Amino acid sequence: MARIDRYILSQFLTLFGFFALVLVSVYWINRAVSLFEQLISDGQTAMVVVEFTALTLPLVISVVLPIAAFAASAYGTNRLSSESELVAMQAAGMSPWRLARPVLVYGFLVAIMSAVLVHGLVPAARARMADRQQELAENVTAQFLRPGVFQFPADGLTLYIRDIANDGRMKDLFFQDSRDLKNEKTYSASEAYLIRSDTGPKLLMVQGSVQTLRQTNGRQSLSLTRFTDMTYDLGAVLGPAKTKSRDLRTYSTPALFWPSPELLQATGSTYDKARAEAFERLAKPFLSPVTAMLGFAMLLLGNFSRFGVWKQLIWSVMALIFVQFLDTALTSQVERDASKWPLVWVPALVGAAICLVALWLAARPKCIRKGESA
């Protein structure tokens, strides 16, 4: 690689590291805050919150990489132009096609990083998160015992807890069992405890009362019984924890290309959906070199101006938005109809076509001048 190529590549990689760090931090903090609120409200510990936020990091990085590649190439090209380095390179006889070579190498380096994430780290992180979510779903305390919210653990059951102390003691509990309409029971207690046993969780209520509404022969009767302590068997009414279907995105790419019957049964998906997910992973890394070239090629258009290249920058941002919108729209189409999986390659191909047209016009400035004069 020539020295000028190494210089441009080093400039872009340095800027890419900065923009990737900033964008990942902003996006990850935003995801972490919402995840923190959800897990803390479910009664999880700080270690669980840290684990879940760490597991979301590979996905965040894979989403941010194409945007960071574009931002670094656009900012680097703008700086080369403003410091007249780009003008000197062009005056030395380097065409836009020649200048694009280190940018293309830079884009493929980012694509390799994206491929490692998409095919390796992201599925592994999703699989680990799915396992942890399944473990937490089996925790009755985290699933149902949330203060200040009316909850419905099962059909005919209503639960409300005013507050939960640090030691797990529930304050001012309201519990209604209306599964049998002819014998409805409403429990209220000043304090309650959740006790684990071999037959499932049990609710120990202290200093409360139970109201029983009976219907016999069209007549209703209400009885009130006060108690010092009473035990209610939650395990008998809640039953075993329900297991959700496995997500396709938790499996490796080779497993999706040749899905086994066990995989299709666990995910509830079809052969076409599994193959579509695999092809989508293959197409995602190619967006990185496309976005990198967009940030470079679009800024080469137009003549030199003392006011900078803000017009070209606006056009490059619009091209990036168009490619990203196309990627989102076509991915949604493939998710609805897996037989349309070739559409996942369209955003990268359209972006590459835009880059080629921009480089062709940049290599022929006379065509641009004629267009401006016309």
Image (cartoon, helix red, strand yellow):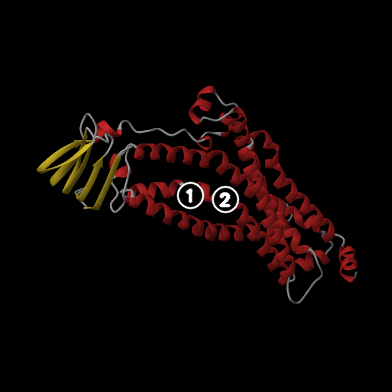
Residue 87 pos. (x, y %): 78, 68
Identify the mark at residue 57; answer none if there is no mark. 1
Q: Residue at x 52, y 33 (%)?
A: 251
Identify residue type, mark 2: Val
Q: Nearer the viewer, residue 1 or 246?
A: 246
Residue 294 position (above or below residue 129): below
* Residue located 73% across and 63% down the image: 315
- First reached walking from the N terminus: tag 2 or tag 1: 1
89 to 164, vertically: above or below: below
The secondary element bearing badge 2 is classed as: helix
Instruction: Answer with left or right where residue 372 lies relative to residue 251.
Output: right
Question: Residue 164: x, y in percent?
Answer: 23, 51
What residue do we see at 71% from left, 61% from top?
A: 316
Disc 2 crowd, CA 10 A, few/some/many (<14, 14-19, 20+): some
Q: Quadrant of residue 359?
A: bottom right
Q: Name the quadrant of the C terminus.
A: bottom right
Q: Residue furthest front?
A: 218
**Considering the numbered disc 1 on the image, is that residue within a helix, a strand or a loop?**
helix
Callout count? 2
Q: Residues within 10 Å of mark 1 (few under 14, many from 20)?
A: many
Q: Which residue is mark 2?
A: 63
CA–CA distance between discs 2 and 1? 10 Å
Q: Please state if 246 lies on the left or on the right of 113 as rendered.
A: left
User: Does any portion of residue 202 appear in the rendered image?
Assistant: no
Q: Nearer the viewer, residue 231 or 167?
A: 231
Where in the figure is residue 326, as x and y percent of width and height? 68, 50
* Any part of residue 244 in sight: yes
Splitting the image into 4 quarters, where does residue 219 fall?
top left
In the depicted view, which residue is nearer to us: 77 or 157?
157
Relative placement, left or right, of 322 versus 225 is: right
Three-letter amino acid code at the position of disc 1: Leu
